[in-house]
Image: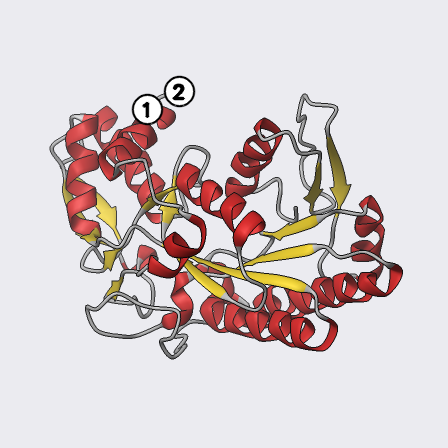
Amino acid sequence: MTGADGFVGRHLVQRLRRAGHEVGAGCRPGGPPVAWGDDQVESLPVELTDDGSIRAALAFEPDAVVHLAAVASNREARDDPGHAWEVNAAGTARLAEALGRSRDEGRDPVLLAVSTGEVYGLGGPESRRESDELRPASPYAASKVAAEVAVLEVWRRTGLRAVIARPFTHTGSGQQPRFALPGFVARLRAAKASGQAVVPTGNLEPVRDLLDVRDVTEAYLALLERGTPGEAYNIARGEGRSLAEMFRQLADLIGVRAEPRPDPALARSRDLPHLVGDSTKLRRATGWTPTIALDQTLRGLVDAEAH
């Protein structure tokens, strides 16, 4: 797994271990070491901008690779689009190529390449389907479309068993406050502690399809086992809620009366007004369905930030 030391990666490492898998936990060199506390998890340094680093990590000889590592922050990608493309697009191309070449050595790994629902870009209020045109509207989303193109090219040329996952917005314990919902929780808690009547936020009008990270990891496992190579699958609840509604619900859970105040420093330059996914294809292929209610996820965020 690349990006094992990230938000989703840490959850997925634990889920894979519960399923009995040995895990090569690919982490970017130079980051803080992760103590997995499990001798069936081996930390592997992986730098996506370095072919040699990728080849060295693949000496683990995995049966499957879950590719999570990416510049995942829209703000970070906007600040340096070239770096986002180097990591997200070129890095994915390097990894897919190395896995494709491993087939010449008698191996037949599965690659689950994790993309994003944001590849669909601007659109109306209808739920997005895998057959929809990809119209990325941010450097982050554009780099992810390029990553998908690279993966599918290797699949066509080498027969690499590559599957693409397009998760929509997801959250849970351990997500950094630079992302919207844990950021709301952190600022609402600060407002309660200080008695502030207002909380700075970005744009609260967008509607998002929100999943719990634990449901997303279950979808990844399902796709590793039953995804069809060369296909992309949405991972989504299929329901939309506005950020304003989720802000109010988090405020109620924390027990604070505070009004949101738009802060340009927190706003994205061009938010997608509506991003909801249709996961019918995934459900039919694997039987996956989300099991954790949104209210439970929001409660879990608040409880996690309290410790």
Disc 2 crowd, CA 10 A, few/some/many (<14, 14-19, 20+): few
Q: In the rendered view, tell whether residue 174 sits above or below residue 229.
A: above
Residue placed most toward the observer, 180 or 62 = 62
**Residue 202 on image: x %, y %:** 27, 55
The quadrant the C terminus occupies is: top left
Residue 136: image x %, image y %? 41, 75
- For residue 130, side relative to residue 67 (left or right): left
Which dot marks residue 12?
A: none
Secondary structure at badge 1 equals helix
**Residue that mark 2 sits on:** 307
Q: Is residue 40 above or below residue 225?
A: above
- Which of 147 and 245 lies nearest the eye of the viewer? 147
Q: Residue furthest right?
A: 105
Q: Mark 1 sits on what residue?
A: 303
Q: Are marks 1 and 2 in contact (CB under 8 Å)?
A: yes
Q: Above or below — where is 46 with respect to 22?
A: below
Q: Tell me which amino acid carries mark 1.
A: Asp
| Left or right of 232 in this view: 265 | left
Residue at image point 24% right, 24% down: 193
Is residue 245 in view from this perspective? Answer: yes
Q: Residue at x 27, y 35 (%)?
A: 298
Label 1, label 2: how far apart the Cα atoms are: 7 Å
Q: Residue at x 26, y 36 (%)?
A: 293
Near mark 1 (Cα within 10 A), the count class, few <14, some 14-19 or many ≥20, is some
Above/below status of 266 relative to 294: below
Residue 64: x, y in percent? 68, 49
Q: Position of residue 289 (x, y in %)?
A: 35, 45
Q: What secondary structure is found at the residue carrying circle 2?
A: loop
- Quadrant hosting residue 119: bottom left
At x 46% / y 68%, what residue is drawn?
141
Regarding residue 190, the answer to whether it shows in the image is no
